[in-house]
Image (cartoon, grey):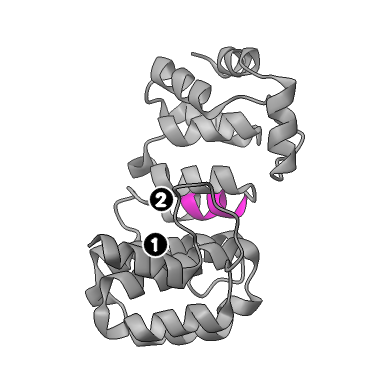
């Protein structure tokens, strides 16, 4: 499919209610208002197409960028390519898909993680803490967990909301995975109080770190 054909197909799925919903979540006007499920439908039809994905990303359209994350080949991206993509997108749902489908499967994330953990760019810092949260579970030997807890304790209260979310995930993962650091993680979460009053649907676990940690430990 060409870029024009793909954009036309996405636009055909758009609706005003969905555009309004996206706008309330912080989406920019350059959008069609397409449901996530319909974007996945287009991705299945389009299949992997790296060149098209790059064209879609360059449009800066919300749905085009979401689709791009599903059909791009992360192995064909350079370190600089991923840096540019992360820095160019402030809308959190796209940033989440970019992390899940492009950054996470990228062959060499550790240099990116180290760079982003020191970055002043909000979206780079957010991605850096996401990678670090993953490392807590999958590759903790490369991390200094007490130093991470020190950073979270001192930096999370003043961090941008986008970064707080992934820092909090790191805090919770440390508390869940490592009994020797659990008391401190719980104490940090309790004293900072971030997400204490976060609204959650029935049956869902609160992102407030003490509740999250205790619930996951209980399930273990």
Image height of 25 relative to 163, above or below: above
> Does residue 53 appear to the left or right of 135 in the view shown?
right
Numbered range of the magenta stretch: 82-88
The percent coordinates of residue 187 (x first, y second) are 45, 85
| Residue 134 locus on image (x, y percent) | 34, 61
Q: Label 1 to label 2, Cα distance in Å? A: 9 Å
| 87 in magenta | yes
Where is residue 137, by image quadrant? Answer: bottom left
Residue that label 1 marks: 131
Element type where label 1 sits in the image: helix
CB-based contact (under 8 Å), mark 1 and mark 2: yes
Q: Is residue 150 magenta?
A: no
Confirm whether residue 114 shows in the render: no
In which quarter of the view is residue 147 placed? Answer: bottom left
Q: Main secondary structure of the magenta part?
A: helix
Residue 154 drawn at (x, y percent) = 55, 86
Q: Residue at x 45, y 19 (%)?
A: 41
């Amino acid at each position: 499919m060409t870029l024009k054909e793909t954009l036309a197909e996405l636009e055909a799925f758009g609706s005003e209610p969905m555009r309004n919903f996206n706008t309330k979540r912080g989406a920019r006007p350059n959008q069609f208002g397409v449901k996530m499920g319909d974007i996945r439908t287009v991705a299945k039809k389009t299949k992997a197409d790296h060149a098209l994905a790059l064209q879609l990303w360059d449009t800066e359209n919300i749905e085009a960028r979401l689709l791009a994350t599903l059909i791009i080949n992360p192995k064909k991206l350079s370190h600089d390519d991923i840096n540019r993509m992360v820095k160019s997108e402030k809308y959190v749902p796209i940033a989440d898909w970019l992390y899940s489908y492009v950054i996470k499967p990228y062959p060499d994330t550790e240099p990116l993680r180290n760079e982003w953990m020191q970055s002043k760019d909000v979206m780079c810092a957010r991605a850096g803490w996401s990678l670090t949260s993953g490392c807590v579970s999958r590759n903790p030997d490369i991390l200094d967990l007490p130093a991470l807890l020190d950073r979270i304790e001192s930096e999370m209260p003043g961090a941008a909301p986008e970064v707080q979310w992934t820092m909090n995930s790191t805090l919770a993962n440390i508390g869940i995975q490592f009994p020797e650091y659990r008391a401190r993680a719980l104490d940090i979460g309790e004293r900072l109080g971030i997400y204490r009053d976060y609204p959650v649907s029935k049956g869902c676990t609160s992102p407030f770190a003490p509740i999250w940690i205790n619930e996951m430990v209980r399930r273990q």
